[in-house]
């Protein structure tokens, strides 16, 4: 997958707006969708604020910021967001029911060769996907805020085409990100598991009276 592709980001909330921004910064044309008009407007505003922060920090030039913003389009309907997409990034509410409904809508309108990448933090989303989408689906779990934290965990499903995982790893490396590849879904991925392990050690130190 080359940079300059069309990306649909489904969900404009805490992670969604950041994922729209990180892909736009990577050179992609992005359509960001949310069922809530207020959330969609808020997402656009959060992107603009983030770009101002990046300019103030010297990460981006002002002209580059305007160019990045011009690559993001807010749309109200999933069908409009995904119709010509090469990559669909799912960042909706973390419930199986909501994701299943969203995947069904994506399936109805996205090109059959589009890659579907879920930003789920802990759900095994593969049983929720329509069968014909499984070979082109992965988990791509980002950390907040994704336009600053370069780490992204990539996980394949049981029926994911291995070439899709390779393609997505290359795609994000070209965007100067740091993908960590898992051959299958594992709850917690890298950072969350390390954080949990450190938390347990802290509790142990407290329980044993060392701190």
Image (cartoon, rainbow, N blue to C red):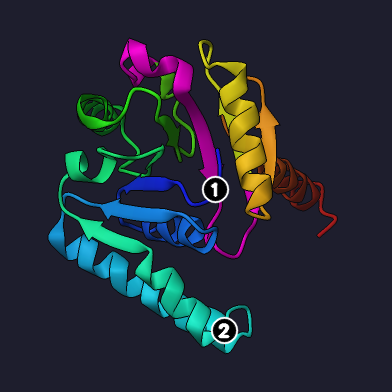
Taking 200 as reference, is 104 above or below it?
above
Q: Is residue 145 visible?
A: yes
Of 75 and 150, the residue lying toward us: 75
Q: Earlier in the sequence, mark 1 or mark 2?
A: 2
In the rendered image, residue 180, in percent from the top left (x then y), is placed at: 69, 38
Tags 1 and 2 touching, CB below 8 Å: no
First to last magenta residue range = 127-151
Residue in view at x 77 percent, y 45 percent? 201
Q: Residue furthest right?
A: 210
- Magenta stretch: residue 141 in it? yes
**Is 183 part of what is drawn in magenta?**
no
* Residue under the image location 60 percent in, 27 percent down: 165
Quadrant including the C terminus: bottom right
The residue tagged 2 is 61
Residue 134: x and y, percent? 42, 16
Secondary structure under the numbered disc 1 in the rendered image: strand
């Amino acid at each position: 997958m080359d940079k300059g592709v069309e990306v649909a980001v489904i969900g404009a909330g805490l992670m969604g707006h950041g994922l729209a921004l990180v892909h736009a910064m990577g050179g992609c044309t992005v359509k960001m969708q949310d069922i809530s008009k207020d959330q969609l407007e808020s997402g656009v505003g959060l992107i603009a604020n983030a770009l101002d922060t990046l300019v103030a920090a010297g990460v981006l030039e002002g002209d580059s910021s305007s160019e990045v913003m011009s690559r993001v389009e807010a749309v109200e309907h999933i069908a409009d967001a995904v119709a010509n997409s090469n990559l669909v990034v799912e960042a909706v509410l973390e419930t199986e029911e909501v994701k299943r409904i969203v995947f069904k809508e994506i399936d109805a309108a996205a090109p059959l060769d589009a890659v579907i990448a879920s930003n789920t933090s802990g759900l095994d989303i593969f049983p929720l996907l329509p069968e014909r989408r499984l070979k082109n689906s992965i988990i791509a779990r980002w950390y907040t805020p994704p336009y600053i934290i370069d780490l992204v965990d990539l996980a394949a499903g049981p029926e994911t085409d291995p070439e899709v995982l390779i393609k997505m790893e290359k795609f994000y490396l070209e965007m100067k990100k740091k993908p960590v590849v898992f051959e299958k879904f594992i709850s917690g991925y890298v950072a969350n598991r390390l954080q949990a392990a450190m938390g347990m050690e802290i509790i142990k130190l407290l329980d044993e009276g060392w701190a």
